[in-house]
Image: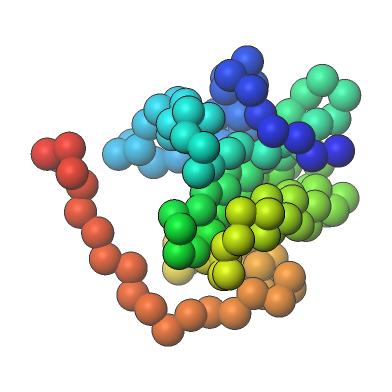
Amino acid sequence: MISRAGAGDGAAVVALWRDCGLTRPWNDPDADFALALASGASAVLVARDGAAVAGSVMVGFDGHRGWVYYLAVSPAARRGGIGRALMAAAEEWLRARGAPKIQFMVREDNDAALGFYEALGMERQKVVTLGRFLNGD
């Protein structure tokens, strides 16, 4: 079953993100989790195996497109449909808010993730992602 994460899920969710190799030194995953819960335009959804967090996904709607971040499934729980269920829940969350399109970024060398998303019917988009840090780093 997929449900919204609460503040008490933060440590387990961030540990899952770390276990799955999704964190980077320049991003603070604890702050990302807290910001997602604090905003009405985003959420963290979790799949549980009993009381344990087996998977999670961060989802947000910017008023133009829906975005997905940090899709993670515990290595011990992979190949059981949790990732697919989390993506379906993310899409449902976005549809309920009127998002016309879903987008997400995958590192170009993450072949496993690219294969997973392509198997779900996602298509590579003809865009380039540009950015810069706003906190002076």
The answer to whether residue 122 shows anywhere in this view is yes
Which residue is outermost to the left? 136
Is 105 drawn above or below residue 8 in the view shown? below
Which residue appears farthest toward the top when viewing the image?
Answer: 8
* 63 lies left or right of 77: left
Residue situated furthest bottom in the rendering:
126
* Residue 20 seen anywhere in this rendered image of the structure: no
Q: Is residue 129 left or right of residue 15?
A: left
Q: Is residue 50 above or below residue 4?
A: above
Quadrant (top left, top right, bottom left, bottom right) of the C terminus = top left
Whole-percent x, y for residue 126 in the image: 42, 84
Query: Residue visible at 85% across and 30% down?
Result: 49
Measured as percent of width and height from the top left, residue 9 is found at 64, 21
In the rendered image of this protein, does residue 31 appear above or below residue 46?
Answer: above
Seen from the viewer's position, the closer of residues 46 and 18 is 46
The colouring scheme, among rainbow, by chain, secondary structure or one colour, is rainbow
Residue 20 locus on image (x, y percent): 59, 42
Q: Position of residue 5 (x, y in %)?
A: 66, 29
- Residue at 76%, 35% (x, y): give it: 3
Q: Quadrant of residue 44?
A: top right
* Residue at figure coordinates x 59%, y 79% from the top left: 123
Quadrant containing the N terminus in the rendered view: top right
Residue drawn at point x = 61 percent, y = 54 percent: 97
Task: Determine which quarter of the picture holds residue 121.
Answer: bottom right
State how many labels appear. 0
